[in-house]
Amino acid sequence: MTDVVDSDELLRRMHRARACAREQELAWRARRDELRPTDPEGARDAAVRTMAYEAVLRVLDEVLTPGRTREDRPRAD
């Protein structure tokens, strides 16, 4: 990976990564809720994946907008 990218492209890539992480977080949260009544083990796995994407979102949020807490941001759910 020897491509050189400018700061605008890097910022675009981080925003795309954040959007992808948000989509995955919502998908795994829905999967967790769907599995909860019938498959507790699958629901636990989905909950862990949800938390992993939440962590990724927190990191990207801090990089993209330092100092702004997640509670300050509009929620999509």
Image (tube, helix red, strand yellow):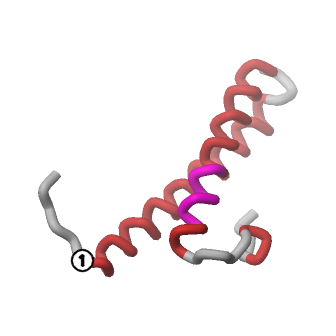
Residue topped by disc 1: 6
Residue shown at the point (46%, 69%) measured from the top left: 15
Q: Is residue 57 above or below residue 67?
A: above
Secondary structure predominantly adopted by residues drawn in magenta:
helix
The quarter of the rendered structure image containing the C terminus is: bottom right
Left/right placement of residue 73 relative to residue 57 reads right
Residue shown at the point (79%, 70%) measured from the top left: 71
Q: Position of residue 50 (x, y in %)?
A: 67, 42
Q: Position of residue 32 (x, y in %)?
A: 75, 36
Q: Is residue 74 above or below residue 36?
A: below
Q: Is residue 13 magenta?
A: no
Q: Residue furthest bottom?
A: 8
Mark 1 crowdedness (10 Å alpha carbons): few <14, some 14-19, many ≥20: few
Q: Say which amino acid is labelled 1.
A: Asp
Residue shown at the point (66%, 51%) measured from the top left: 54
Left/right placement of residue 34 relative to residue 13 reads right
Residue shown at the point (45%, 60%) measured from the top left: 17
Q: Residue furthest front?
A: 67
Q: Bounds of the magenta span?
A: 55-61
